[in-house]
Image (tube, rainbow, N blue to C red):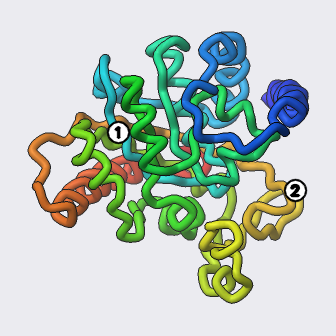
Amino acid sequence: MLSELVTGATAVSTRLASDMVGALGGLRGDDPDEWDPEYIRRTLPLLKSTFGSYFRGEVRGMENIPTDGPSLLVGNHSGGTLIADTFVFAYCFYDRFGPYRRFHQLAHDVAARMPSLGILRRYGVLAASHENAKKAFDRRAPVLVYPGGDYETFRPSWHSDRIEFGGRRGFVRLAMEQNVPIVPVVAIGGQETALFVTRGERVARAVGLDRLTRIKVLPVQLGPPFGLTLLDLPLRVPLPAKITVQVLPPIEDLPDEADEAYDTITNTMQDALSELSEERTLPLVG
């Protein structure tokens, strides 16, 4: 397993170096047509063999994703910046529907725009904004969004069984304005890839990180190889926690009022996440 991960990391590093050279011409992350189905076709086996084996990824309920037309897939976010659940879900999506079905994921600017992360844009990553989501909907694509963002992905490990969107309701208004179905995507295991200790929101505000980067946390984690890390820096190697993802049926008959709709969606997701948590017998093992 370790040798496969090293081989995969080497291949990805080579690809990233090429991306950096090719993307220096300007800001990236807003063009849905950077999505590259041929690249996905070529690299999907590698993604499956590395992330699939290392995290023993399991995605249930893929049949609940509408087979045609746009939809908003609303997920809970885990695992710091290394987002193991996102990679597991992405390769399972393309494995089921094929590399030629368009699929986009909204991500923080740091991930979506960096020249060295062109591999993510080839798989459909866009900088998180309503405008970019609308571009993807216009192309009849499912769009994956994580409303909790950095607030949720760096929640303490003992909150791994909680949906924590921090009251962010923009995704509800987006779905209502665009008249697309909301499909909840609930995952567990990401908060076991390290020991997440604290979000560090006060520290982030004190040093101005939120103003400079739109990152509102400065979290502390414990994980190999360096032990203590801040915001996953220096580089943290994720522990091989089992990642389980459950796709729920589209939520129908949502209340017209955004606050009520938000409560309906988060309560539905919390019920599903609690069930996934009850299944887990041991950390990491799942």
State the image quarter where residue 258 is shown.
Answer: bottom left
Residue 10 appears in view: no
Residue at image mark 1: 72
- The amino acid type, in three-letter code, at marker 1 is Leu
Give neighbour class at mark 2: few <14, some 14-19, many 20+ (Cα, 10 Å): few
Label 2: state its secondary structure. loop
> Marks 1 and 2, Cα distance to the nearest angstrom?
37 Å
Does residue 242 appear to the left or right of 239 in the view shown? left
Residue 268 appears in view: yes
What percent of the width, then of the height, locates residue 11? Answer: 86, 24
- The amino acid type, in three-letter code, at marker 2 is Pro
Position above or below: 276 against 31? below
- Residue found at x 81% / y 70%: 228
What percent of the width, then of the height, locates residue 250? Answer: 23, 36
Position above or below: 3 against 248? above
Does residue 166 appear to the left or right of 107 in the view shown? left
Label 1: state its secondary structure. strand
Q: Extreme front residue here?
A: 25
Q: Nearer the viewer, residue 136 or 147?
A: 136
Position above or below: 138 against 220? above
For residue 225, which numbered disc appears in the image?
2
Position above or below: 156 against 94? below
- Residue found at x 55% / y 14%: 99
Give neighbour class at mark 1: few <14, some 14-19, many 20+ (Cα, 10 Å): many
State the image quarter where residue 79 is shown.
Answer: bottom right
Q: Nearer the viewer, residue 142 or 247?
A: 142
User: Where is the N terminus found, in terms of image quarters?
Assistant: top right
Q: Which is in the foreground here, disc 1 or disc 2?
A: 1
- Residue found at x 41% / y 70%: 166
What percent of the width, then of the height, locates residue 89? Answer: 51, 33
